Image (tube, grey):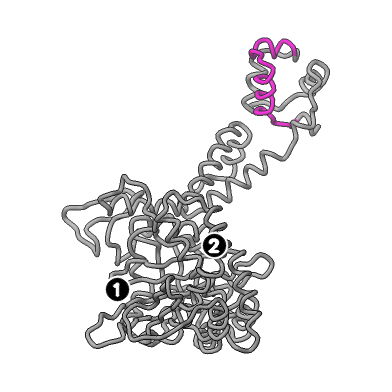
Amino acid sequence: MAIQKLYAGAKLRETRQRLALTQKDFAAKLGVSLPYLNQMENNNRPVSTTVVLALAQEFGFDVTELSTGDAERMVSDMREALADPLFGDDLPPLADLRLTASNAPALARAFLELHSAYRQTHERLASLDEALGREDARSQSSPWDEVRDFFHYCDNYIDAVDRAAERFAESDGQSGAQAHAIERLSAMGLSVIEEDTPKLRHYDRKTGVLTLSSRAAPETRRFQLLLQLALLTQDKLLEATLDFARFQTETARAIAKIGLANYFAGAALMPYGRFLAAAQEVRHDLEVLANRFGASIEQVCHRLSTLQRPGAKGIPFFFVRVDQAGTITKRHSATRLQFARFGGACPLWNVHRAFETPGRFLRQLAETPDGVRYISLARDVSKSGGSFGAPVRRFAIALGCEVKHAGDLVYADDLDLRHARAFEPIGISCRICERADCHQRSVPPLERRLQVTLDERGVLPYEVG
């Protein structure tokens, strides 16, 4: 009885095509009429017992293949894909999905592959900002972008460099990272001095003298000292890592080497194991961590975004720095949130408001168009030039994570996490944001149709379809 109710037209059709038989020849071998076979292949009739036996006897066909769960799994996958906000609320009924999975499995698979490709390339759409905003759009990526992508696709965690820095930090005894670094350089016949100079760091290879600017903050001098130490003592490790990366130009390789030395400096100042334990202990209180490790707030935030060591991962954070024009100058995300690769960040994000409240932390609960909710912390990190008339470099940074980790952050203690109205809608950048009703939109979305009504004007001069 179960076999008589078996609808397996797609399997039957695939079998015939694999055998390179016409419907007429296949029907003859199965002992059925041509119209009857056509109806079975199109799921207008169930596969009969006669046909099942003929498949087994004539072709040695494993009849259990006719009743595999491929169709149901495909229906489940299509329902999951169609839950994407991309498709809106007008979803096909379940019966239509089952019909597609049974009658047109190749089409269903193509749909699933297409949706998967869409999701995987969603971040890459942001690169269209470059094509629209740069005169040299047709040229190759700049060395700076190439290096930034290298760190991004490594999840901003370089294991060999991180562990080397941790070993250095563990060998400092009670002297601390700065004193230990000076001791190491002294043992190499090098010396460290401080002078009133606008250059943060200068190393003279002929004299073996490293000069640090006394104008810089103590944590900056400490960081620059460790950076130079990395360049002098970890050259083989840095070069091996660069060989692995295979950069296209020597300029990119040189930029990346500075980046790796920066990475070593941060990891030596805040060694992985100790820093992760401390962050968990103080529930990621940035000021406490900065004081404990002799680092700046920005250095602490950046280090938190790198804690992705396999087997000992910290909270997946995103970290970003923007200038007053809203241009992203540093970015990394271990979360599902991906920043615009070019141009500015969403104007609704609290990082832009940080310039208005210097010295204060701003908290924000936010929701992205994909429905994921985050807690974001923002603060200005303006940097003095160290003398009267010297230009002040003004930046703002943001650090955040998905709201499911809010319990591990001291900053979330009194926030209302239960109600949807507490979460502000934010996007990535206007050109790739799918929100149709954003009052702060600066340009239309790339992949949406616009409706322009001459006799009406809302907040925007168009509506997003």
Q: Main secondary structure of the magenta part?
A: helix
Q: Is residue 328 left or right of residue 52?
A: left
Where does label 2 land, which residue?
238
Q: Position of residue 294 (x, y in %)?
A: 51, 86
Q: Residue at x 65, y 74 (%)?
A: 167
> Is the residue under label 2 in contact with that under label 1 (CB below 8 Å)?
no
Q: Position of residue 284 (x, y in %)?
A: 56, 82
Where residue 155 appears, as percent x and y from the top left, is 54, 62
Image vertical order of residue 313 relative to residue 69, above or below: below
- Is residue 305 in sight in this rendering? no
Residue positioned 79% across, 20% down in the render: 50
Mark identifier at residue 313: none
Q: Could you tell me the amino acid type at mark 1?
A: Gln
Residue 184, quarter of picture: bottom right
The numbered mark, 1 or 2, whose residue comes first in the sequence reads 2
Q: Is residue 387 visible?
A: yes
Q: Which residue is mark 1?
A: 324
Using the image as rendered, state which of residue 256 and residue 76 is in the foreground: 256
Disc 2 packing (10 Å; few <14; some 14–19; many ≥20): many
Three-letter code, disc 2: Leu
In the image, 130 versus 169, the foreground residue is 169
Range of magenta residues? 5-29
Mark 1 Cα-neighbour bin, 10 Å: few <14, some 14–19, many ≥20 = few
Q: Is residue 80 above or below residue 333?
A: above
CA distance separating discs 1 and 2: 33 Å
